[in-house]
Amino acid sequence: MNEFVLKRLKDLMWILFLAALVVGGSRFVYGLGATTNMMDALPWGWWKVFNMIAGAALATSGFVIAAVIYIFDLRQFRSVARLSVLVGFLGYGASLIALAFDVGLPHRGWHPFFMWNPHSFLFEVFWCVSLYWGVTALELLPILSERFPFPKLTHVLHEIMMPFVVLGVTLSTMHHSSLGALFLASPTRLHPLWHSMWIPPEFFISAMGAGLATMVLLILIISWLFNKEFERVVLTRLAAGSAIFLSLYLVIKVVDLTVHNKWNYVFGADKSWESQVFLVEIALQAILPILIFSIPVLRRSKPCLFIGSLAAFLGLVMHRLDVGIVGYFRTAERVYIPNAGEFILSFGLLAGAGLLFFFLIEKFPVLSGIGFGCPEEDGHDSHQQPKVSIWTLQEALALLKGPGTERVLVIALLVIPLANIGLKGQGTSAFQPILSPVYASIQSGDTMRENLRIDANRNGDYVDFGHKKHQEVFQEKYRLGEKETCVKCHHLTLPKDNNTVCRSCHSDMQVPMPMFHADRHEERFKDDDQRASFASFDLDRRKQNFEACMMCHEETMIGLAAYAPKGFDQMAPGFTQAMHGNCMTCHRLEEKDPTDPFSTGNCLGCHRPQPKPAIAAELQPKEPFLVPTKPIRGPVIIPAEKVDPIL
Amino acid sequence: MSKSAEDELPVLDAQGKSKRKSKTKAILTDATKCIGCERCVQGCVEQNDLPQDFPAHFKSNDGLSGARYTSIVEVPGKDPGTSRFVRRQCMHCADPTCVAACLVGALTKSADGPVTYDADKCIGCRYCMLACPFSIPRYEYEKALPYIRKCKMDETCRVAGGAPACTSSCPTGATVFGLREDLITEARRRIDERPELYVDHIWGEHEFGGTSVIYISDSSLGDVLKIPTDKEFAKRAVASLTHESIPHLVHNWVMVTPFQFAGGLAILGTIAFAKRRQRVMAETASGKDEEDES
Ligand code: SF4
Ligand code: SF4
Ligand code: SF4
């Protein structure tokens, strides 16, 4: 039964891991924008916060157990010593590899060793984490040296282990508080429930509590998977230790909220959805595990231990995600949800670490304390073969020949769709062909705007407009400079023009709208006298309206005088009329020939019946013009009405 | 970099004389004068040869992006139905959080004001983006090898006359370049002259330890600039940020680190050594005792 589960679990891990390789590769080809949902407003995504920050906390057991055994000399934990160091080593390794995908320029990963900024908490984290990783690797060396016949090396390693453990534990305490200190920098961006000047100790203490609980969880799972019993006292002691740290964390958090006067964010006036998240998080992270771990009866029952340690595990992940991502939502005004590819890479790397973990505990004397894998001492010759087959490369190849072939094939077949989901989660679906009123020439990169494909209401019924041809005809016909001919159609240039769509003035599809904002104008008066005299005009009356303008714009108004009395308070036409007016004002006046396709009343002259005429080959988009599925900035939502062909 | 060119910079000076104490350059933006024509953006784009800014899911609503160092944001004005245009750009903080945050020191504060970015050092961790209280630095997410992008305000921006391209493109003088001291004086003068128009506050004068880009306006710009009011600071339990910079606020935690390292090594080492001796002695004396919980 358990072997069956173990086998399936390994298959699943292989699938995830291989899919992660594909997704990870795509990140380096297409970039972070196309493969993740990370954004400017929330620059730290799932990989950093889950894999690195939460992952480091969960791998804490490595240093706590090492400290307990080697420094405080509590020998009863010996059976899990190597297990915990291994968890630390693999956990940090997976995190660091995830980081290589996350940072923009991973080939410069060595920069912080030579370019220093000691004021940066991230600098400290980087140094401590990489040093600590090296130390865990050293701490693991005896496992290898015992497996192979190097008795001398083993002896030396055992002798010099102590200083390294001390160094590793110190580095650990440092970087756990520094990981929290990273978020000290966001006092105004991070939600007050999670930002506090006390984050560093909070991170440190919660990491120790959760790290021990994770150890319990892991031991329970391993002993179930491999049918091995650990001494119960180890489990209960670990749980008790975890309860102590978690209680300490809870106390600090409560004092923190009280001292900094933040309870109003939880229960009071400033309650929001974050409060609910926070309460769930505290319940999972601290309250539930503390209850279970501190009641001796519950602590001794395996299911309760499992629930408690699982809660602590999930609670810690939730806490780190809240601090690193969720707490920023409110000020970023955006919500970040990782896409499939981010999840696949993240869990795939963990699965890879898990496979290595299984490999090591089955082949090397990691759990020799409970008679699993190799015996700890004097056992270089007699290490027993593991009962469960594990997939080294050799074995994987052997499977191709043997009855395992189907299995490899199945795995391969499963990897493909998974990798596909990962690849699709983003890039491709996040972008769509451009939806602009004028798009053919923009797409094709035709800066001269030779041909415009105009779809004013964006319903797919477009009109092809020969922009260049009109320019030429205008120049010939009116003998005007190029500039003046443009003004014939481009009638208005507003502030923020590249954001101004026609509809910001012509706001109704049919009905003419007033477009002169007297209020806005008034702001620019020089003094109160001017404002007062302007206010004395009755702007609804045409004549007075004109005189009001004359107050300042004398020169301009003189020229308009003949025109103004009848037209100056004109309304802007409706959108439909305006769009039609752009063409029909000229075509109606000047080409009254009913046989002319562009003449008045001949709708089909421009609005060609379906299917639409093909765009000339040179105007076909050279590459897809990428815009997001969701409108980004000042979206203009235009109802999908049909173009009214009647002017 | 040439000292002489900098000394000759024309400085907007209210009194027509300059009593220069500090050489810190700054930009003053007066939202009441901005008409939102985005010429500053245009100037910056041309000067820095920025690429086309296509919309994408990773770009923010404020118009800043990997392809735009400055942008104009439209916010509701004082009266209903009116709007104000606010220029967004790097604030060039006096004590910048991004500089303190960058682990390789790719961002540096120059003595004369600008906060500059060294693309050759950056590893792309994006901590500067997370740390900047105004969320200014942007990232080229669209590229496989991306860099941080943000307003530079350094020599490469300066056009004839010594001012950056953005301020020299402004047709209304809504955004001007000069020495920070002079600009603060000028901002004060404008506010004092027309107290009925302006809000009596210079955004960026003191908050977060002061910035080199300062704003005045007739309605609150706190929301768009992401500068909280004194009350909001106090509510978040970081009241000192009204005049103190973030790096200064968290400085104590940085200082703890070396002590943590030395202390940790000393204490743990002593314990380890003592315990080991204890054990060795106990072992030589007799067997070992295992405790058990049952
Ligand atoms: S505004 Fe942000 S990016 Fe600019 S100097 Fe200040 S902290 Fe750095
Ligand atoms: S992204 Fe680059 S500039 Fe920003 S903190 Fe990281 S290394 Fe420094
Ligand atoms: S200072 Fe330079 S980089 Fe910044 S907005 Fe102005 S022109 Fe652009």
Image (cartoon, coloured by chain):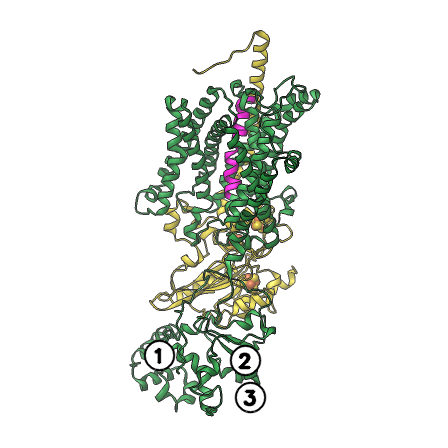
Magenta region, residue range: A49-70
Q: Earlier in the sequence, mark 1 or mark 2?
A: 2
Find numbered disc 3 in the image and state the secondary structure of the residue it sits on: loop
Identify the residue position indicated by label 1 in the image.
Answer: A512
Q: Earlier in the sequence, mark 3 or mark 2?
A: 2
In this view, B16 is above or below A569? above
The yellow one among the chains is B
Q: Is residue A446 in the magenta section? A: no
Amino acid type indicated by mark 2? His
Amino acid type indicated by mark 1? Pro
Identify the residue position indicated by label 3 in the image.
Answer: A480
Find numbered disc 1 in the image and state the secondary structure of the residue it sits on: loop
Q: Residues within 10 Å of mark 3 (few under 14, many from 20)?
A: few
Residues at marks 3 and 2, CA–CA distance in whole angstroms: 16 Å
In this view, A634 is above or below A347? below
Which residue occupies 51% across, 60% down?
A431
Residue A146 position in % (x across, y down) = 66, 22
Q: Chain of mark 1?
A: A
Q: Chain of mark 2?
A: A
| A238 and A268: which is toward the camera | A238
> In the picture, residue A479 is in which quadrant?
bottom right
Q: Nearer the viewer, mark 3 or mark 2?
A: 2
Q: Which mark is residue A467?
A: 2
The green one among the chains is A
> In the picture, residue A263 is in which quadrant?
top left
Q: Nearer the viewer, mark 1 or mark 3?
A: 1
